[in-house]
Image: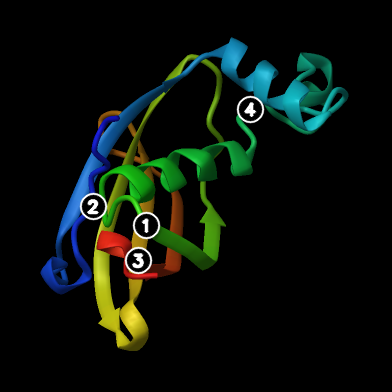
Amino acid sequence: MTSRFCIPFEELEVGQSVEKIFSIKREDILSFSDEIGDLHSFHVLQSAAHEVGFEDIIVHGVHLLAFVSRVIGENLPGFGTLYLSQEVKFLQSVEPDSEILVRIEVLEKREKRRVLLRTDIYDSQKKTVLWKAWVSSKHFANGQI
């Protein structure tokens, strides 16, 4: 069995951050859309994307959320983090065959092992912010559930 990475709540520090780059291929968007049963929107049909002003299909916002969740659960704080709530702003669309950079930063440590995280998604050159979110989580690191 492989060990799971986590930073114990006591060792989390305000300002601590992590960044990960992901590639999102057209096939990934279509597969995600198929998985959730979205078969006719501007996320899957180029004709529908044109109708609403996009040049091509775009990634679902909740698909982007999956990358944020992955970085939180694997890197900061890591395994045992329970996602409680979020506030998100979608600032730019993400097209197929793009690279995104997910950045997570610890903003606050709160009572009852709660953590406020800032989560940003940038284009791969970190020039354009595509998404901003604030996530409240409860941290159960080291089996302290």
Q: Furthest-front residue in view? A: 1
Q: Secondary structure at mark 4?
A: loop
Verify CB contact (< 8 Å) between mark 3 and mark 1.
yes
What is the x, y in percent for residue 45? Answer: 79, 17
Locate the N terminus and report the quarter of the image it occupies. top left
The residues bearing labels 4 and 2 have C-alpha atoms spaced at a distance of: 33 Å
Tag on residue 80?
A: 1
- Amino acid under label 1? Gly
**Residue where numbered disc 3 is placed:** 140
The residues bearing labels 4 and 3 have C-alpha atoms spaced at a distance of: 35 Å
Q: Secondary structure at mark 2?
A: loop
- Amino acid under label 2? Cys
Residue ID at (35%, 51%)? 72
What is the x, y in percent for residue 102? Answer: 34, 41
Give the vertical position of 143 relative to 96 (above or below): below
- Amino acid under label 4? Ile
**Residue where numbered disc 4 is placed:** 58
The residues bearing labels 3 and 1 have C-alpha atoms spaced at a distance of: 5 Å
